[in-house]
Image (cartoon, helix red, strand yellow):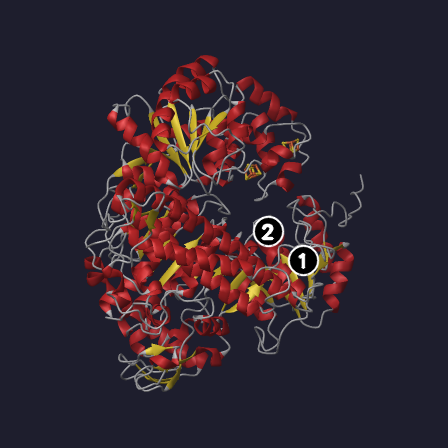
């Protein structure tokens, strides 16, 4: 007999009902569990401490005080202790852990919400299908030691994550942990959980909702404020969770509404909408939220969860845009209309009696949103609503600016708004057009102006011509990297002949507009790095074009091979990027990944040249994604807003004893070059970041050809962007075969003259100098138990 | 008409208004005093960021370098400095503050760490945040001679108008 989850009533026994909860299916136990299945907080602590010993946490407090409890406020300036005994370092570590944990909770709760919804629709036994892969859930397998086959198999995975989140959260209570390093270990644990939570969320939606499954040639879709046809009613969905929005698209499909309504998405919901139905359009990333609402173009807004501005209802109401909230995370104080008739809700919203509605019945959301958009479109058009000033008003507003600079001081990027106002008053709009891309649309300036100028609206009006042209293309998120692609490319990655994977991910809080990441991606693609992207960054990459009017997605294909550009998908698809490194360990190197996190992270750290770039990271989710990458041995670079996360993990290349590694063949210790040099670092400009990315792709396992290729890019980008041969280039040279071909002689000379190395000039060979020799069989490891013959 | 008296202590509020770190905030300093403090330092380090396009800044850096102050070129400032013939070492600012924190770091010249960090030409929020590392975890003196008030320094100019900024820097140099 097979038992399914259900409710039974036993005949003749009145009032007795037996609930059968989850039944452990046979395949769950099939896999061997490995050394640390479902690790507790302390289980991977040794690994964390190894990482933290080499990559020391460096804190940059945003606030020198602590106000956690009523003992405080405590002044911790200068690493003083507060009333509870915690010092500044540990407090900063606690803060960072807490922020990261918020991000972990956001992704995992998203996964839970979606899983509940999809189980209700498709049943627990719905099979996982992510494309042509046997290794379907690499993170889950590595962390939990189980191999999920159905979406129901993810229930214990989320149970585990939720329990761990509770345990981690508990440690932040006053008067407990006093060690900064242990808080870091907890933050790393939270980061690891986050990746698994994201994996669950994306695998179940890919499996159940027919999203692309490891598909390299997904179609291109339109992106940009200028790509939305505002002559039609516009239905805008903002957030990250497709659960409710999928019903809207189903309804629109069934009722042939896609050519009558413009369905547009903002933030990651937009990615997932296009993955579900390519008729959807993408307005853009988080930075466009307030700008697009203020444009007055949307006729109805549907919000779900995560990166959705807290003032959406307030802003939308001013412009008579009804808001439909669909998730516990964001309810905006609206009445719950789940049990009401759709017609009644429509009536209340059209009349303006209510500014929005909260609905948990997604069938109703599916019907309500498009029908409401069809009604609101003409009504709002007739009312002629827009928040942007007309030409005359614009002139008046810009002329009323006294150049006091209060807005500049209030702007997080210190943008020269005052200068743009002055120029515009004189009829020159170029400064506003420049400012528009640099402005992250936060709206802080509006609160600063003593003259009451609605600054953001003025910026948008000033850049209107430019905004109308904002049209680009994005290749729809492809999902996981398939096993066959790993088979093809894994070797090149480990040996270094593909110089690295650059993951351009995260939010749009860029220091200097979105063009930076376009330039970075283009440079890396031209140099044959594999560029993977997701979330808001994937959108912004599609917003810029070359001289022939082509976006990067139109110029570079989406296969996982060198020189390709892959849009993986939404935020939760980031899991597939870290999972790719696990796949290389499993498929190329044949490592047993089950419940074997430490060994796999050790492998990734030492052999896979993957680097994350979160150039505009702002969110807690981005923080925990980064920290999760770090626990898996993947370095991450942040933009100049990054130090506001309070903590980095930095290596010290001059501290030679931190770069000792064991050879897993015999336990002998080798002093290796600092590769990768840092785990989490920030940079100030795109010019600084390019050589940094190249350098962070070095790994101890690079073979000669691989190291030569990586060193060539490092040197070339350093010369191109910083104007010099980097002063540490020589420490990455292990033999003459590592030297860039075109510069070999010149560099040998430098090694001899500037660094005292011995060169055999007849043979053009290095005789003496390098820290170590290249040994193709070297098995670098940081974990003693992985040395051959070691006893546990 | 005589030029207005230069007062670099005015308008000493965080340039990013909410960037109020806590009870200990930089003292607003007159340019002359900043110059004197720098000249008294035994092991000063001039830390330059990428925001050095303003007319006149590079000349000032050159003068300071010529007075013997070693220059750390952070961000992507090195190219510009090299073009002007200024000797400088590239270092990432985040990495630099972690080295400065380390008593075992030998400095750029191998002679040990630095007692005074002088900040000039930075992306405001980036430098501010990394000054907080030095402020909270080292004994190094932090002097900001940048255009905007830096609360995490020990001494900083207030928010200056562009024209006053270069004048102030000239006063600093005159003291070296
Ligand atoms: S948690 Fe500790 S440091 Fe923070 S306010 Fe309370 S006593 Fe002070
Ligand atoms: S909306 Fe733009 S200009 Fe205004 S404060 Fe924010 S980033 Fe600065
Ligand atoms: S705060 Fe207002 S008046 Fe002052 S510079 Fe900005 S826009 Fe002009």
Q: Nearer the viewer, residue A725 or A354?
A: A354
Q: Residue furthest top?
A: A382
Quick check: is the Cβ at mark 1 less than 8 Å away from ligand 1? no
Residue A462 pos. (x, y %): 51, 28
Q: Is the C-beta separation of discs 2 and 1 under 8 Å?
A: no
Q: Residue at x 21, y 56 (%)?
A: A133
Question: On screen, A184 above or below A105?
Answer: below
What mark, if any, has residue B125 been given in the picture?
2
Question: On screen, A436 above or below B19?
Answer: above
Taking the image as drawn, is residue A432 in sight? yes
Q: Nearer the viewer, residue A49 or A739?
A: A49
| Element on which disc 2 rests | helix
Is B128 left or right of A514, judged from the image as shown? right
| Element on which disc 1 rests | loop
Taking the image as drawn, is residue A723 in sight? no
Q: Residue at x 37, y 24 (%)?
A: A368
Residue A485, by quadrant, is bottom left
What mark, if any, has residue A64 been given in the picture?
1
Is B35 left or right of A522, judged from the image as shown? right
């Amino acid at each position: 007999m097979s038992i399914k989850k259900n409710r039974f009533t036993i005949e003749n026994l009145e009032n007795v009902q037996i609930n059968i909860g989850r039944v452990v299916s046979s395949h769950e136990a099939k896999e061997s569990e490995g050394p640390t299945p479902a690790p507790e907080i302390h289980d991977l602590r040794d690994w964390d401490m190894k990482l933290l010993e080499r990559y020391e946490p460096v804190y940059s407090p945003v606030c020198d005080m602590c106000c956690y409890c009523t003992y405080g406020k405590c002044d911790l300036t200068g690493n003083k202790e507060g009333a509870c005994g915690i010092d500044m370092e540990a407090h900063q570590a606690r803060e960072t852990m807490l922020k990261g944990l918020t991000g972990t909770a956001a992704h995992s709760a998203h996964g839970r919400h979606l899983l509940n919804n999809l189980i209700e629709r498709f049943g627990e036994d719905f099979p996982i299908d992510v494309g042509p892969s046997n290794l379907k859930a690499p993170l889950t397998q590595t962390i939990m030691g189980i191999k999920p086959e159905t979406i129901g198999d993810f229930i214990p995975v989320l149970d585990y994550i939720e329990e761990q989140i509770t345990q981690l959260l508990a440690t932040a209570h006053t008067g407990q942990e006093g060690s900064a390093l242990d808080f870091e270990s907890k933050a790393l644990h939270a980061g690891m959980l986050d990746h698994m939570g994201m994996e669950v969320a994306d695998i179940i939606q890919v499996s159940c909702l027919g999203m692309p499954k490891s598909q390299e040639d997904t179609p291109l879709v339109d992106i940009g404020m200028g790509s939305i046809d505002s002559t039609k009613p516009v239905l805008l969905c903002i957030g990250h969770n497709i659960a409710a929005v999928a019903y809207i698209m189903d309804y629109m499909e069934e009722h042939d509404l896609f050519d009558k309504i413009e369905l547009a998405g903002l933030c990651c919901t937009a990615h997932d909408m296009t993955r579900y139905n390519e008729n959807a359009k993408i307005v853009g990333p988080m930075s466009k939220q307030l700008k697009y609402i203020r444009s007055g173009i949307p006729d109805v807004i549907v919000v779900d969860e995560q990166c959705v501005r807290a003032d959406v209802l307030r802003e939308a109401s001013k412009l008579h845009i009804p808001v439909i909230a669909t998730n516990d995370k964001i309810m905006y104080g609206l009445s719950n209309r789940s049990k009401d008739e759709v017609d009644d809700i429509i009536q209340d919203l059209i009349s303006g009696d209510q500014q929005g509605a909260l609905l948990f019945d997604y069938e109703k959301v599916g019907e309500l949103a498009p029908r409401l958009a069809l009604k609101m479109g003409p009504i709002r058009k007739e009312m002629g609503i827009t928040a942007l000033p007309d030409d005359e008003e614009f002139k008046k507003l810009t002329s009323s600016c006294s150049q006091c600079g209060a807005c500049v001081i209030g702007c997080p990027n210190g943008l020269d708004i005052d200068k743009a106002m002055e120029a515009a008053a004189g009829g020159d709009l170029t400064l506003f057009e420049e400012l528009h891309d640099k402005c992250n649309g936060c709206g802080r300036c509006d609160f600063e102006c003593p003259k009451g100028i609605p600054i953001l609206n003025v910026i948008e009006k000033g850049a209107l011509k430019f905004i109308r042209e904002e049209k680009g293309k994005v290749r729809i998120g492809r999902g996981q990297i398939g096993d066959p692609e790993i088979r093809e490319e894994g070797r090149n990655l480990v040996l270094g002949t593909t110089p690295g994977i650059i993951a351009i991910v995260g939010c749009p809080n860029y220091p200097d507009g979105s063009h930076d990441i376009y330039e970075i991606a283009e440079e890396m693609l031209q140099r044959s790095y594999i560029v993977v992207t997701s979330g808001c960054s994937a959108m912004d990459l599609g917003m810029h074009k070359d001289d022939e009017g082509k976006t990067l997605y139109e110029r570079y294909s989406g296969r996982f091979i060198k020189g390709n550009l892959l849009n993986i998908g939404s935020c939760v698809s980031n899991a597939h990027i870290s999972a790719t490194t696990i796949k290389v360990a499993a498929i190329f190197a044949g490592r047993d990944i089950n419940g074997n996190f430490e060994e796999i992270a050790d492998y990734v750290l030492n052999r896979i040249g993957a680097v994350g770039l979160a150039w505009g990271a702002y969110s807690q989710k981005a923080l925990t994604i980064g920290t999760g990458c770090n626990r898996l041995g993947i370095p991450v670079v942040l933009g100049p807003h990054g130090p506001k996360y309070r903590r980095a993990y930095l290596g010290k290349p001059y501290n030679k004893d931190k770069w000792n590694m064991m050879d897993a063949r015999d336990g002998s210790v080798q002093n290796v070059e600092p590769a990768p040099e840092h785990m989490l670092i920030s940079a100030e400009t795109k010019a600084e970041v390019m050589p940094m990315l190249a350098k962070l792709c070095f790994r101890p396992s690079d073979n000669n050809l691989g190291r030569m290729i990586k060193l060539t890019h490092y040197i070339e980008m350093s010369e191109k962007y910083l104007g010099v041969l980097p002063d540490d280039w020589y420490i990455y040279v292990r033999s003459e075969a590592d030297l860039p071909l075109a510069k070999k002689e010149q560099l040998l000379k430098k090694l001899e003259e500037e660094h005292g190395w011995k060169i055999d000039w007849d043979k053009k060979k290095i005789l003496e100098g390098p820290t170590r020799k290249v040994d193709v069989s070297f098995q670098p490891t940081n974990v003693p138990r992985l040395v051959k013959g070691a006893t546990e | 008409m005589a030029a207005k008296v230069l007062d670099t202590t005015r308008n000493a509020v965080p340039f990013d208004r909410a960037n109020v770190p806590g009870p200990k905030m930089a003292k607003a300093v007159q340019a002359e005093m900043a110059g004197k403090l720098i000249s008294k330092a035994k092991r000063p380090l001039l830390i330059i960021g990428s925001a050095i396009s303003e007319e006149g800044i590079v000349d000032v850096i050159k003068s300071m370098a010529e007075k013997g102050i070693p220059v750390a070129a952070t961000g992507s400032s090195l190219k510009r400095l090299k073009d002007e013939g200024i000797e400088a070492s590239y270092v990432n600012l985040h990495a630099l503050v972690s080295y400065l924190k380390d008593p075992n770091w030998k400095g750029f010249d191998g002679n040990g760490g630095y007692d005074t960090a002088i900040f000039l030409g930075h992306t405001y929020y980036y430098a501010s945040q990394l000054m907080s590392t030095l402020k909270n975890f080292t004994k190094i003196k932090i002097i900001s001679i940048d255009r905007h008030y830096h609360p995490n320094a020990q001494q900083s100019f207030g928010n200056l108008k562009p024209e006053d900024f270069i004048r102030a820097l000239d006063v600093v140099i005159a003291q070296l």
